Image (tube, grey):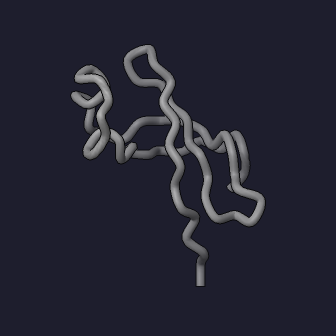
Amino acid sequence: MKVGDPVLFVPDCWAHGQGSDTIRAYTGPIKGKIVYIHPKRRYYVAEGQVGGRTIREAFQIIPKN
């Protein structure tokens, strides 16, 4: 995983946030890219486009055992 990699994600804000009705009406995964990775790889930030708007959300990185 590195910055710029493509990613599919379902933002939690659609289910639990206070976003606009336009964004909350879309409930499927969106195509985006990774825009930030915490230096200790604790989380990453994904960014994608929905209805002409850019949204970002952070996701925990779960280590592989």
Residue closest to the far top = 52
Drawn side of residue 34 relative to residue 28, left or right: right
Residue 10 location, x and y as percent? 38, 45
Residue closest to the far front = 18
- Where does the C terminus fall, quadrant-wise? bottom right
Residue 44 location, x and y as percent? 61, 52
- Give the answer, above or below, for where 51 lies relative to 27: above
Residue at image coords 51%, 55%: 59
Residue at image coords 44%, 14%: 52
Drawn side of residue 46 relative to residue 22, left or right: right
Residue at image coords 41%, 36%: 30
Residue closest to the far bottom = 65
How many labels sit on residues? 0
Q: Quadrant of residue 20?
A: top left
- Give the answer, above or below, for where 62 lies relative to 32: below
Residue at image coords 66%, 44%: 5
- Give the answer, above or below, for where 46 lies relative to 44: above
Residue 3 location, x and y as percent? 72, 45
Q: Quadrant of residue 13?
A: top left
Residue 45 location, x and y as percent? 59, 46
Q: Nearer the viewer, residue 64 or 22?
A: 22
Drawn side of residue 39 relative to residue 8, left or right: right
Q: Nearer the viewer, residue 14 or 3?
A: 14
- Where does the N terminus fall, quadrant-wise? bottom right
